[in-house]
Image (cartoon, coloured by chain):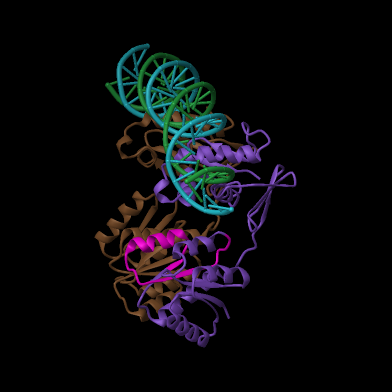
Chain colours: A brown, B purple, C cyan, D green
Amino acid sequence: MSTVLIVDDEPQILRALQINLHAHGYTVVPASNGTAALAAAQTQAIDVVVLDLGLPDMDGLDVIAGLRGWTEVPIIVLSARHGSHDKVEALDAGADDYVTKPFGLDELLARLRAATRRAGPQAAEPLVETAEFTVDLANKLVQRGGAPVRMTPTEWSVLELLVRNPGRLVSQQQILTEVWGPAYAKETHYLRVYMAQLRRKLERDPANPVHLLTEAGMGYRFAP
Amino acid sequence: MSTVLIVDDEPQILRALQINLHAHGYTVVPASNGTAALAAAQTQAIDVVVLDLGLPDMDGLDVIAGLRGWTEVPIIVLSARHGSHDKVEALDAGADDYVTKPFGLDELLARLRAATRRAGPQAAEPLVETAEFTVDLANKLVQRGGAPVRMTPTEWSVLELLVRNPGRLVSQQQILTEVWGPAYAKETHYLRVYMAQLRRKLERDPANPVHLLTEAGMGYRFAP
DNA sequence: GGACGGTGTTAAGAACCCGTAAAAACAGGC
DNA sequence: GCCTGTTTTTACGGGTTCTTAACACCGTCC
């Protein structure tokens, strides 16, 4: 579903939101200060920002301004301050919504839904290309020689993880925990089966892969 | 500047808002009940709606639903009720913002600015065409071979969601949460029923769909 | 050379998912 | 209150995917 950047300096609130939003299907990117938030927003595809105004390193309004400098991503502000002056400042700085603490989780979820609903189709995710095939992350579409290639859910999860880390070595443990869950971190034979299937679908010569490479004992690497 | 439709059954509040917003450059269209509000929204060009939920003739949620049936205009809800359940319902019905009374005028003005700001660039509703049928998003009209095809509300919601994301794979979870609501995210059998109905109405050979495709385990995809 | 750990390939049953039709429950209009 | 159209529920056959197992392969180390 959507990716939420959560910015809050109180670890327990950050953790609670992280767990709850994840349970409701969101991918959560946490940040405990303004600098980390701005950095995270630039390196990852964020669909909506939940921003606590009380940050240790910089003014929350500057975080809003920093984001608004280059992105239209919806920003929901959390704040303990009820004063209307604070609300006006945050909204005029570019925030989309302002929620005062304490707030109910269901209210935050509803406001998240409202924010993502109107933001609609977000900026295009990258289209990863190789000489043999192309992977369209946003549309979950794989093409080879112009023709679409059907992927099963597990195949897609593995492929997506590799393709989102082009050139980087992804450990077997990491793939297993992210695709199958932490309990499967040792089931390396799953990986062998699915890597074989991916190569059969995507590589010209599955026995001598060019793009989906094995690093024996380490993990796998996607070479563009 | 912008035109605001204000819906409130208390004459003095309606009058006060009218004067204040007018003083801040807004053109104000007043309505004292839900029926008048829906009528006004259809006859005049409205940029943003300020809606009090406590109306004499109909439930405020139905007003939201009525507006959302055909327009994306931003809706700011005013309510005396602080309960998070009320907020969730209003936001999920399609409202963009929820302000509890009492509120400061400057806060309302800031929220109006935020709402109109992001509504800004209104894109024209496209006419989606395939070899078999055409979908007119703006007029909620589906045609096949020149003849209009009747759609039930639910059928239309599902079709609209798919057609608005041409080529993109839309997960079952996403369709269910957007059409039926977050509580129905697991009711995948609804989808099977409605996809079958849509295909029966729109595909030449419903058993071998060309435009409304299934990706087993992943979701559905509309291919233009 | 042979054992061994890690890897690739294939196949088959189990588990799960999907399409279809038809009936039951529900809602709105008259 | 009845009637019509819509949504929800139910059941089942057929298909796809996941998991598991068995075996071949390739290098390294003893």
Q: In the rendered view, would you say A158 is above or below A208?
A: below
What stretch of residues is rendered in magenta? Answer: B70-97
Q: Which percent across, then down, holds residue B86?
A: 36, 63
Q: Quadrant of residue A184?
A: top left
Q: Which percent across, then down, holds residue B3?
A: 57, 77
Magenta segment includes B71: yes
Quadrant occupied by the C terminus of chain A? top right
The residue at the point 33 percent across, 63 percent down is B84
Question: Which residue is the extreme one toward the right?
Answer: B146
The residue at the point 34 percent across, 73 percent down is A58
Question: Which residue is the extreme one toward the left?
Answer: A12
User: In this image, A98 relative to B47: left or right?
Assistant: left
Toward the viewer: A199 or A139?
A: A139
How many numbered tags mark residues here?
0
Q: In the rendered view, would you say C30 is above or below A36?
A: above
Q: Note whether residue B68 is visible.
A: yes
Magenta segment includes A111: no
Q: Note whether residue A224 is visible.
A: no
Q: In the rendered view, would you say A135 is above or below A123?
A: above
User: In this image, A97 relative to B48: left or right?
Assistant: left
The residue at the point 47 percent across, 37 percent down is B189
Q: Which percent across, then down, holds residue A99?
A: 35, 69
Question: Which residue is the extreme one toward the bottom?
Answer: B23
Q: Which percent across, then down, holds residue B123?
A: 62, 64
Toward the viewer: A155 or B147?
A: B147
